[in-house]
Amino acid sequence: MACRTHDVIERAEHWGAHNYHPLPVVLTKAEGPFVWDIEGKRYLDMLSCYSALSHGHRHPRILAAAQKQMQEITLTSRAFHNVAYADFCEKLSKLAGLDMTLPMNSGAEAVETALKIARAWGYRTKKVPSGKARIIAAEGNFHGRTIAIVSFSTEEAYRAPFGPFVPGFDIVPFGDADALEKAITPETVAFLVEPIQGEGGIIIPPEGYLRRIRELCTKHNVLLMLDEVQTGLARTGKMFAFEHEGVKPDVLILGKALGGGLLPVSACVGTREVMSVLKPGEHGSTFGGMPLSMAVGNEAIDVLVEDDLSARAARLGNEVVAMLRNAKLPGVREVRGRGLLIGVEFEDFIGGAMTVVEALMHKGVLAKDTRVDTMRLAPALTIEEKDLFEGIETVMSTIREVAASRKR
Ligand code: PLP
């Protein structure tokens, strides 16, 4: 490992907590779909900060919007009004086909917001007895890292040393609408689910699942809360993944790409009936809704819409998935994808997706595993076709090399 890289990693490991296991690469510069390390080597970024960099790194329009806002006003707190906040709430509510928006910062905070809204709606509107509200989540879910959220994680690694956990959650298998119907009780207030499980390994539910769960939630007076932190905002080939089945949630949770690759911006968007259960003082965030974040969020949305990035994600994603499948790559069990959210699952003899990820790093392509055996490919939606297909060629040749070097 080169000397400057080594020095930075050593200090990071010494002074920083070890809650991640990063690849041994120190990034210092970025543009569009590319990043450069401290030694000057260029990489194609096929992770895109887990979809937060859907616009690519340092998108010129988003940088300009931030710079303009920085010349005017950046932080107000929600104790006062600001123009960019009003613009953002209107823009995002209309984009989602919903009525009201509550901006936060991280994805987990937006999920927490949704959980609180669901419980408050349960008591105030559905009239569930006080303290009895229950929320159903799906097996294999990933909604963030707070205590409440890991309380309904089914992944032991996310929960192990963090109990006692928050009560009031039930788990059903992902993709099984009948199991959801069986689990609903008069005390169920919401079903929280990802339309495609991202961290869970790019797991796409059976066709018709979203329609069925929408019907069931309506039938039983249960809120459908879709966590589109990873799938939303053009990533899967539609502006929102729920559009693939023509349904609409009661509450939509967004994050990641909402910050345009620049800032942490998240939001809970919902119907007026549901969002109106919150009263002043019951929920908030010092930085949520700040003018700088809102200006960035507004521009991030405009770029997605004006450049029709969902159509681009759909077209390029189809081509990439077809390329990867048609190549019949050794050691690949399955290729799953919707739009430019793609998972490549490896057979056991490969020794985990990290084996391929590390080999790819040496070839100048950055990707990451999700769970043990799946590699996620999620390039910027703005990536030039030439760069994308060159990157995919590198992915394919690297998989062949890794497979050849390992015994079945
Ligand atoms: N929800 C989903 C579906 C996610 O994929 C993530 C992050 O990967 C989160 C919530 C949490 O977002 P954050 O890391 O910004 O808190």
Image: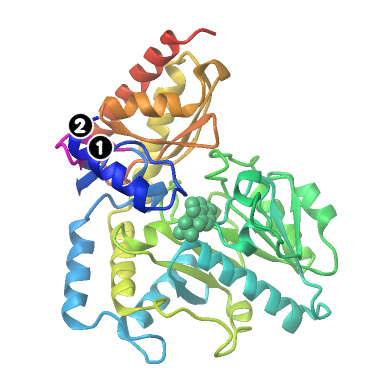
276 in relation to 359, above or below = below
Pick whichever, 148 or 2, lies toward us: 2
Span shown in magenta: 36-45
Q: Contact (CB < 8 A) between labels 1 and 2?
A: yes
Disc 2: residue Cβ within 8 A of ligand 1's nearest atom? no
Residue where numbered disc 2 is placed: 2
Residue 253 position within the rendered picture, expressed as x and y whole percent measured from the top left: 53, 63
Q: Is residue 352 left or right of residue 66?
A: right
Residue 6 circle label? 1
Q: In which quadrant will I find the N terminus?
A: top left
Pick whichever, 78 or 277, lies toward us: 78
Q: Is residue 135 left or right of residue 333?
A: right
Residue at 17 percent across and 66 percent down: it is 64
389 drawn magenta: no
Q: Residues within 10 Å of mark 1 (few under 14, many from 20)?
A: some
42 drawn magenta: yes
